[in-house]
Every structure is written in structure tokens, then in C-alpha cells.
Amino acid sequence: PGFVIPQTSLSSTKVEKLGFNFQELYRVSSKTLLTFEFDSWREEIRSDLISISRLEGFGPFPFNDTTIGPSVPDSDWKALGVYVSGETHLNDVQFNAGLRWDNFWVNARETPGYVDDDDVLLIAQDANFSALNGSLGIVFPLGKGVNAVGNIGSAFRAPNVVERYFYGRADGNLTRPNPNIKPERGVTIDVGFKGVHNTVNYSVIGFRSDYTDFVQLLIFDSSGVEPLWRFENVGDVTISGFEVLVEGFRDNGVYGSLGLTYQYGNNNTEDNPVFVSPFKVDAKVGYRHNKNRLFGELHMRWTGDQNRIPTVATLTDQPTNGYTLFHINGGVTVCNQVRLSATVRNIFDKIYSEPFNGRSPNNPLVEPGRNFILSLNTQI
């Protein structure tokens, strides 16, 4: 009695995006290929209204449907990118190099209803971000279909509309805008080898990514009844790991594959874990009959527990449980252009959450259960 209890809420956002991409390839010589690319897009975001059904006052009063203001302002996001890359061969060694320039413009407008707790209109700041990034790679033959590979490249990510402007309750937390948030920047190195043979292909790749100004949701004010959160740049972060893939196939139509992935994340500034995907195993075994045009595949996906989570008080990630899923599909090619197939996903109706969807204690998202899919595909 005497307080307001929100029961359900519904947010709606209108996003319109228009983009353009152009790419041209130039064969300079038999051993050298140049690629030029230009892309641009404009995204219009129109304010989302939050509709809340709640109980108010004392006693068993009926639900009252109310609409409150948007949590982000009307804004236009424009991007322009120019990319050039080259591939050349020196004897049997292949070299790849690329250079890309990006620029982002963010124009926010005064938006009715985008107000603070005192109903004062919030003024969202415009922003402009730009970056120049490059990459360099090498493919070195070791003999008998095996190549050593290595790449190094830099990366850039501009903060999105939620990270810059969100005002309201998100994922159970009172979240506020951060107009001073900076883009994430990173450098990634990967090395390994790949093999291509008559009946088997394989690759083993290790990688390390170092980020500066990594973005996470943190508490910035704990003086009130509830702490206030916002997206902030937490400092230097390292994410490393490896990927292994083996594919095999036989002339009788039987094939299979096995993939392993592992990541390890650490916030070097705070000497604390960063939540990343846990160890995963992906395995497939299948059969294709070219004469009778039959096909079938059994797919298993295993995801381990994620117990390495941040322990600092400003983060709320929780451990996630691992799971094993099985999918099966099969069908027949009726004619050259028509294929009929049936699929059962999550055969044993496993209750599970993907790690990044289950990491929040306030709003863990459960994935769909058993799915039956019947499809008819044609190609003209």
C-alpha cells in the first residue's frame, strides 16, 4: 500500500536505415590484386515510447496504463568509410595489406518527453568520431598443402545510441547518459596454420586483442536510494584465445566437422575478469547422396560453464551454466532447383540461455525450446 509497482512495460523504437556500398577490383598483374571500397549509410532513430501497466495507491485497484517519455532522443547517425587493400605474391609467399578510414556524425535533436526525473528536458549533445585503421597479413607455405598464416590489424567502434544517450531503467538498473564516452579502439594479432588435403581440411589459430577505452556499464553515483549507472570507458582490456577447426569428407558422401573455441578476457586496468564466451565445441556429421539427392545432418553444440566473471562491486555479471544442444535436419532435392527439408532444433527441448543473454541477474533471457521447421527452397 502507498507505492507504485510496475507490472509490464513495452518499448517501441522506429529505426530507418539507408546505405550505399561500392567495390572495385583491379588486377595490376598476375600476382597483384588491388581492392577499393566505399560505403556510407544514414540511420534515423525516432524516439521510443514506454508503455507501462501498473498498480497504484492503496488496496486492490485495477491496472492503470500510462505512457512515459522516450529513453533516447531523436537522432541521425551518418557514416562514411573508405577502404583500400592489396594482395600480392613474392615467390610462393602471399602478402595482404589494407587501410580503412571511417567517420561517424551523430546529430541529436530536442525530443519531447526525453526528460530527467524532474521533467526537465534533456539536451543531447552531438558527436563526431573518426579513425584510420590498417591491417597486414602473410600466408607462408610449409609444404604438402599446409600454410602458416599471420595477421595484425587495428579496429575502431563508435559508441551506439544506448551507450551515449539512454536515460531510464535498463536491465533493472537506473541508467543515465554519458556524452563523454569515447570509441573503443583495439589491435588484434592472430597466428596459426591451415591445411588443405584431399579428404581433410584443418586450421589452428591463436589470437590476442588489446583494447583501449573498452566500454562497460558501471556505477558512477551510489549516493542515492538506488545507484546510478552509465556506460563508461574502463581502460585497457585484453581478450585472447584460440580456434580449432577440422573438416573431413569421403567419396561415399559422408562428412563431418569439429570446431573448438576458447576465449579469455581481462580488464588490465582493474586486474579483473571481462565476461567473454566460454569454451565451446561444435560438431557435425552428415551424409549427401548425389545420385538420390538425399541429405541429412546431426549437429551437436556444447557450451561450458562461465565462472570467470568480474568481482568488482560496479559490475553485475553472474556465472552462467553450460548446456548441450542437438539439432537434426534432412531432406531431398526434388529437382535441380527445388529442395525440400525438415529440421528439428533443440531436439531434447533443453532449457538454456546463451552466455551473454544469461549473464544478467535482473533479466536473464531463456532461448527457444524445441523447434520444428519444414522448408521448401527454390533457386531461379
Image: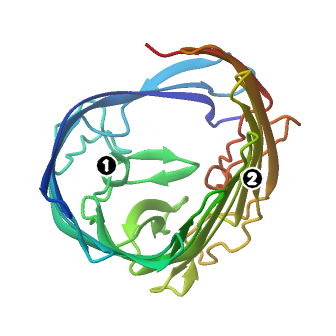
Tell me the crowding category of disc 1: few under 14, some 14 to 19, or many 20 or more residues within 10 angstroms, Cα based: many
Whole-percent x, y for residue 239 in the image: 50, 75
Percent across and percent down for residue 347 are: 85, 34
In the rendered view of the protein, which quadrant contains the C terminus? top left
Q: Position of residue 216 (x, y in %)?
A: 45, 65
Q: Going from the N terminus, do you reach mark 2 or mark 1 first?
A: 1
Q: Is residue 360 above or below residue 146?
A: above
**How far across and how far down the image is residue 103, in percent?**
14, 55
Q: Quadrant of residue 65?
A: top right
Q: Amino acid at mark 1?
A: Tyr
- In this rendering, the answer to whether 194 lies above or below 73 is below
Amino acid bearing label 2: Ala
150 over 181 or under it: above or below = below
Q: Is residue 344 visible?
A: no
Report the residue at 64% width, 55% height from top: 360
- Kindly identify which residue carries mark 1: 165
Q: Secondary structure at mark 2?
A: strand
For this rendering, which residue is in front, 327 or 157? 327
* Residue behind mark 2: 283
> How far, Cα to Cα, is label 2 from label 1?
42 Å
Query: Is residue 208 positioned above or below 259 on the image?
Result: below
Say the numbered circle drawn on residue 373.
none
Front-most of 161 and 42?
Answer: 42
Which residue occupies 34% across, 45% down? 116
